[in-house]
Amino acid sequence: MRFVDLINKKVSGQNLTSEEIRFWIEGYVNGSIPDYQVSALLMAIVFRSMDRREILDLTMNMAKSGDMMDLSAIDGVTADKHSTGGVGDKTTLVVGPMAAACGAHLAKMSGRGLGFTGGTIDKLESIDGFHVNLDHKAFIRQVNEIGIAVVGQSGNLVPADKKLYALRDVTGTVSSIPLIASSIMSKKLASGSQVIVLDVKYGSGAFMKTVDQARELADTMIRIGRGAGRKVRAVISSMEEPLGHAIGNALEVREACQALMGNGPDDLMQLCLTLGSLILIECGICSDPDEARERLMESVKSGRALDKLVQMVKAQGGRPEQIYDPSLLPCADHVTSILSPVSGFVHSEDALALGNLAMQLGAGRAKKDDAIMKETGIVLCVKPGDYIEAGSPLAAAHHRLPLPDGWLEECVRAFDIREQREDPHPLIADIL
Ligand code: URA
């Protein structure tokens, strides 16, 4: 087989056979097919797309390119929750302990943040001593004993995606639904959980800018997962605005702890209850959404969900005092208020702009190996629909270094304040 023939086929809009897709992924991972040829094929896929069978073949070959986690030693059904990424998205830290407190088994591998989007692993590492590297036996034991473990990706999980994603990043080939869906789902399939609940974001702070694109991505991922014999559900949720108030690692852990103490922002809680009820239903713990929501709310009221987070933090080397008293988490030396220049109603808050501004303070990394400053970020004082007086704070910047030139002005521009109030758009656009 010659790789150039595969490129030519895709350029002319033909489908690749299962054998050709296997040849591509095996050859790319073992180094016999060079980056420049794979880049050409990826670009052809961006323009010509792939059909359902091709997407499933691609995903399965990617998933099997490295270790496939065997979670069969975990008692009961295992669940994983995945967000396509966003700004202020700390749902895993809230819904994970809530679902575990209701009897679910969450075996979760998470990633680090890149660009304006955060990563759960970075957030958890803002807890003193918390480590994300558990060997397989310890991971299984922890999920069996506590019901939840969140770890970093193991060394050899989906090497095909590591190479392909790095190449897509520098060749303008990220924005293709077949490529995004196969990248995400290959990691989910290799991670081994039987139930996969996806939070597919749309809006300024997400990969998918519109609800329709997000629905198409969700549909594609659901089909892949079901084709591979897993139970998959998806929520389409808005990332026009950041989720909750806090953006930045320790700040988000603090907000997650407050949510588990019963003081969470409405949008965060609404999303966690929706995702959590899908987890409980698909795991066979509850049979109807109202019952599931009831049990999840009860886990917060009773303190059992917070206790679950504490148990996980203890088991992974972290300081539980920081969960019971989040003011002990790393704090920034400087807090600067961003004041509203006008009075009016908050119409929108640009998630992408705020994510980038938080990154400039050190909360995120522009390049994979950049260091982050755990304590930095932005806390929003208002949400869409709220009224604000001129001179009152829109947000607070938590920073270690002086604010960059023009930062405050740019931050003010991220808020759209209008004279008339309009109802904020719904957080959850669909459940599939
Ligand atoms: N997240 C992934 O893991 N892969 C993509 O292609 C896009 C987002």
Image (tube, grey):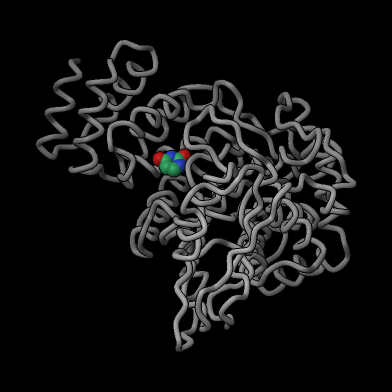
* Quadrant of picture, ligand 1: top left
Q: Which residue lies at the image location 60% right of the left edge and 45% below the top edge? A: 402
Which residue occupies the extreme bottom position in the image?
Answer: 420
Quadrant housing residue 338: bottom right
Report whether residue 269 is seen: yes
Quadrant in the picture for the N terminus: top left
375 versus 336 height, above or below: above
Q: Quadrant of residue 353?
A: bottom left
**Is 72 positioned to the left or the right of 194 in the image?**
right
Give x and y (percent) for residue 129. Answer: 81, 33
Establish if 284 lies above or below 381.
above
Q: Residue at x 56, y 79 (%)?
A: 390
Q: Residue at x 57, y 45 (%)?
A: 361
Q: Which residue is outermost to the left?
A: 12
Q: Residue at x 67, y 67 (%)?
A: 269
- Depth order, front residue of 366/278: 366
